[in-house]
Image: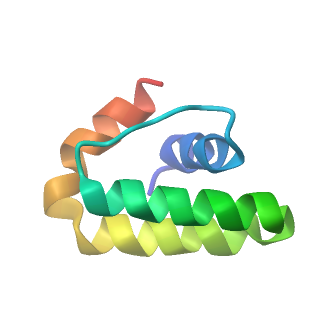
Amino acid sequence: MTPILQAKFEEILKGNLKYVSSNLALNMLISRLQRKAIADPRNMAAYIRELDEFVTRYAAVMGEEFDKIAAL
């Protein structure tokens, strides 16, 4: 994950940016990680790492999502 995408994902998890994906699995992961980030913001690196693993595993379907998130 690029540093720009990582920063955008951090803002999404903190609730500073609103993003709704067309990918249901990504939406569910973001929602779950947002709840965790609100409960314990000190573990943001672990949440970003989990997101990175997801987007790396499903890179073929995430390309379009990356463009949308980078444009936020």
Q: From the viewer's perspective, tell me whether residue 26 is left or right of residue 19.
A: left
Note whether 64 is above or below 54 in the view shown.
Answer: above
Residue 19, percent across and down? 45, 36
Residue at image coords 37%, 71%: 54
Question: How many labels, in total?
Answer: 0
Residue 22, percent across and down? 23, 43
Residue 9, percent across and down? 55, 48
Between residues 25 and 49, which one lies in front from this camera angle? Answer: 25
| Colour basis | rainbow
Residue at image coords 44%, 57%: 1
Note whether 69 is above or below 3 in the view shown.
Answer: above
Q: From the viewer's perspective, tell me whether residue 18 is left or right of residue 22.
A: right
Residue 57, percent across and down? 27, 75
Q: Specify the quadrant of the image occupied by residue 55.
A: bottom left
Note whether 51 is above or below 10 in the view shown.
Answer: below
Which residue of the protein is positioned furthest toward the left in this rendering? Answer: 60
Q: From the viewer's perspective, tell me whether residue 66 is left or right of residue 6.
A: left
Which residue of the protein is positioned furthest toward the top in this rendering? Answer: 71
Note whether 9 is above or below 70 in the view shown.
Answer: below
Residue at image coords 71%, 46%: 14
